[in-house]
Amino acid sequence: MSYLFCMWLVLLILGLVAVASNPAPYFAALGLVVVAGAGCAVLAGFGASFLAVVLFLIYLGGMLVVFAYSAALAAEPHPEGWWDVSVLEYVIFYLVGVGVAVAYFSSEWYNYLLPVVSVCKEFFVLCEDVGGVGVMYSLGGGLLVICASVLLLSLFVVLELVRGASRGALRAV
Amino acid sequence: MTPTHFSFTTAFILGLMGVAFHRTHLLSALLCLEGMMLSLFIALSVWSFQMGVTNFTPAPMMLLAFSACEASAGLALLVATARTHGTDRLQNLNLLQC
């Protein structure tokens, strides 16, 4: 396992620490961008190129635009970053916890730090995730229909939730 | 436990602790949920790749579709809360009056 791959793994954990340590939503969305990029790089390091592209496009193209809009909705004049005391103590707490977990589990990691194993799959003709996702359109057609109907149902849920203050699921009494 | 397994497990647990502990905004709780779903996506993809199970690779795609449903419902709740309460701070959700 190369050192660059380990750097992406470390960046994955650090991005989740940045999201989970209760900053303002602007900075938490920035941390989630870092997590999505690092996760994409991890999947690409495993050779799952199609899933990496799907992850990157869905998260950065779809969800984070909506999250940026909602962060603008929940705006505040002085957003607290990671340098504030109330956030910084969460950051230190999470980092100490991760450090304890690393010290507990890292005794067997020297096997995986050698760049040996991950090359032997390159003799395959078929790219594995592209062929696998193609199965979703043939054998997994029923699951695909279920996914589409769930998305349609969530559209109606959203329309019912934001319907208005007088009607709908959530109203001011 | 390999370093990859350790990192996405730690990412999931960090997101779970971020949801469970004190949150100021509703939106940051939703962001922690997104981080958890992202680590689950990485876990399913890495599992199907390390085991060589080609037929399992649609499962992360469907997880992504369901996480889109979850994100849309959460954001709709956020918008409705900002309408009725005027803000999305979780302290205001304890109030019985609007």
Image (tube, coloured by chain):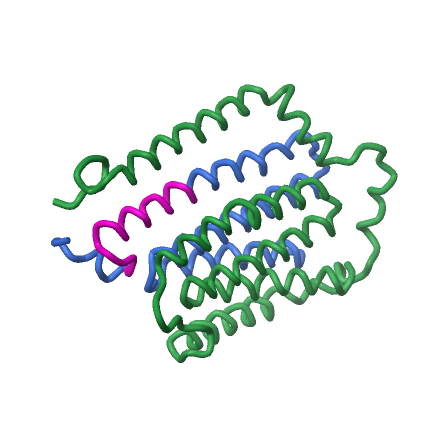
- Quarter of the image where one finds residue A124: top right
Residue extent of the magenta highlight: B71-89
> Measuring 70% from the left and 32% from the top, which residue is drawn there?
B54
Give whichever of B49, A138 is nearer the camera: A138
The N terminus of chain B, quarter of image = bottom right
**Side of A90 relative to A133 (left or right):** left
Residue A132 horizontal/vertical position (percent) = 69, 31
Q: Is residue B72 magenta?
A: yes
- Quarter of the image where one finds residue A23: bottom left
Look at the picture and state if A10 lies above or below A85.
above
> Measuring 32% from the left and 64% from the top, which residue is drawn there?
B24
Q: Is residue B84 magenta?
A: yes
Q: What color was chain A assigned in the picture?
A: green
Q: Residue furthest right?
A: A123
Numbered-mark total:
0
Give whichever of B42, A112 is nearer the camera: B42
Residue B72 horizontal/vertical position (percent) = 41, 42
In the figure, the blue chain has which letter? Answer: B
> Measuring 58% from the left and 34% from the top, which residue is drawn there?
B59
Residue A171 horizontal/vertical position (percent) = 19, 42
Q: Main secondary structure of the magenta part?
A: helix
- Quarter of the image where one finds residue A164: top left
> Measuring 25% from the left and 50% from the top, which residue is drawn there?
B83
Give whichever of A46, A78 is nearer the camera: A78
**Side of A74 relative to A115 (left or right):** left
Look at the picture and state if B11 lies above or below A136.
below
Residue A41 horizontal/vertical position (percent) = 69, 54
Look at the picture and state if B58 lies above or below B11.
above
Give whichever of A93, B73 is nearer the camera: B73
